[in-house]
Amino acid sequence: MKHTYEYPRAALTVDCVVFGFDSTQAALQVLLIRRGLAPFKDHWALPGGFVRVEETLDEAARRELEEETNLSTVFLEQLYTFGTVDRDPRERVVSVAYYALTKPADHTTAASTDAAEARWFPVSDLPPLAFDHAEIFATALARLRGKLRYEPVGFELLPPKFTLTQLQRLYESVLGTPLDKRNFRKKVLSHDLLVPLKETHREGTHRPAQLFRFDPVRYEKLKKKGFLFEI
Amino acid sequence: MKHTYEYPRAALTVDCVVFGFDSTQAALQVLLIRRGLAPFKDHWALPGGFVRVEETLDEAARRELEEETNLSTVFLEQLYTFGTVDRDPRERVVSVAYYALTKPADHTTAASTDAAEARWFPVSDLPPLAFDHAEIFATALARLRGKLRYEPVGFELLPPKFTLTQLQRLYESVLGTPLDKRNFRKKVLSHDLLVPLKETHREGTHRPAQLFRFDPVRYEKLKKKGFLFEI
């Protein structure tokens, strides 16, 4: 005697919008895979797949990411669940979408699985995507933009040591708008969340720039006091 | 030949955290229903139920709300999808949670269905909840708190005409903290989003207070210009 809803049931998938930041090109990127099977065979799509009945949604997202893109330890958060009735031509499929933030070191890992199957694209120049993945991507980008302004998530997209110019390029590339250099530096340094390092970074013929690291312990302390990170 | 994942499949439900604001008690409230069936028979729970294969998630949430609480036109947004493996003792059930904001006029509607079955509780004094509904509720309250500070969602919980005192009580009751009256008034009036009406409201022996309404058209205009609502 099971008081529950019987078949037909929707199938349940997870899909992941994986963001990366290319410092040299100052471009926000997203990781796509080329589908090997119908429907949308040979189309680009977000990595993802069916949720197994014995795994949580987070576990399914991490498993699919690792299987399809080789990525294992990344910042991963649930985004939104997409459930229009006809979003998959096969049958009713509800998809729990996630977004992930990767560090530059993960870029080669992800690409190395199989260059023909997984590839980074600049968000400003995406190919047509399978299913409703363009809508999922747009939702993820909007979430990232909103989050970047009030939480220090940007550091998840940078190497552990970075210059203030790299940080500004990242913000500009996510927000899609240029920022005033003096104001930006004043704001990010006012939080006291960036620790200056004894190292510098030289790019091309520019003079060496100070490297910083983000201080997550201090951030957690400030957050408990009601501090609001804001750029 | 369907390239899809076969059974066993998780069952899919929606659950709704319905918030209301009781002006006279200055209390944020949540609408609960008493379960008539096992599991958790006679326990209080969030209104919700199984998603039908031919309806979207939003449609399922609205249908369940109307069936179980009589509420029809409310502000409703998807919250988060809960998918731990053992959250339902019957079998694997994944639940897409929503939160809803209701106006005081909806309160009696909701209660009138069947007083023994649907009831408003102050959020500060909830009964034990079935399943993982306490966790879903906590997630919804955190979302509402975050949202209230940056979006004018509070007006969804007030009557169309309200006093500044009512507005402040609402903010205080959601955020769980007293606010300075002068600062609060300065901030909410600085946005120019509140339209003073030619009517007043008298409460008890207090002198009549000016009534206001929220101006959603002006808000949309400001938002397009990059304006950030902030309290």
Image (cartoon, coloured by chain):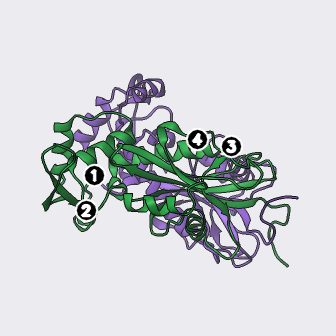
Chain colours: A green, B purple
Chain letter of mark 4 equals: B
Q: Chain of mark 1?
A: A
Position in image of residue A141 (x %, y %): 48, 44
* Residue at the image point whose x is 75% and y is 69% from the top: B36
Q: CA distance from mark 2 to mark 4?
A: 43 Å
Q: Position of residue A88 (x, y in %)?
A: 75, 49
Q: How many numbered dots are placed on residues in this image?
A: 4
The residue labelled by disc 3 is: B72
Mark 1: secondary structure: loop
Mark 2 in CB contact with mark 1 (< 8 angstroms): yes
Type of amino acid under label 1: Phe
Q: Is residue B220 above or below residue A29?
A: above
Q: Which residue is mark 1?
A: A229
List x then y, in percent, for residue B210: 36, 29
Say left or right for A94 vs A220.
Answer: right
**The label number, if any, that marks residue B193 in the structure image:** none
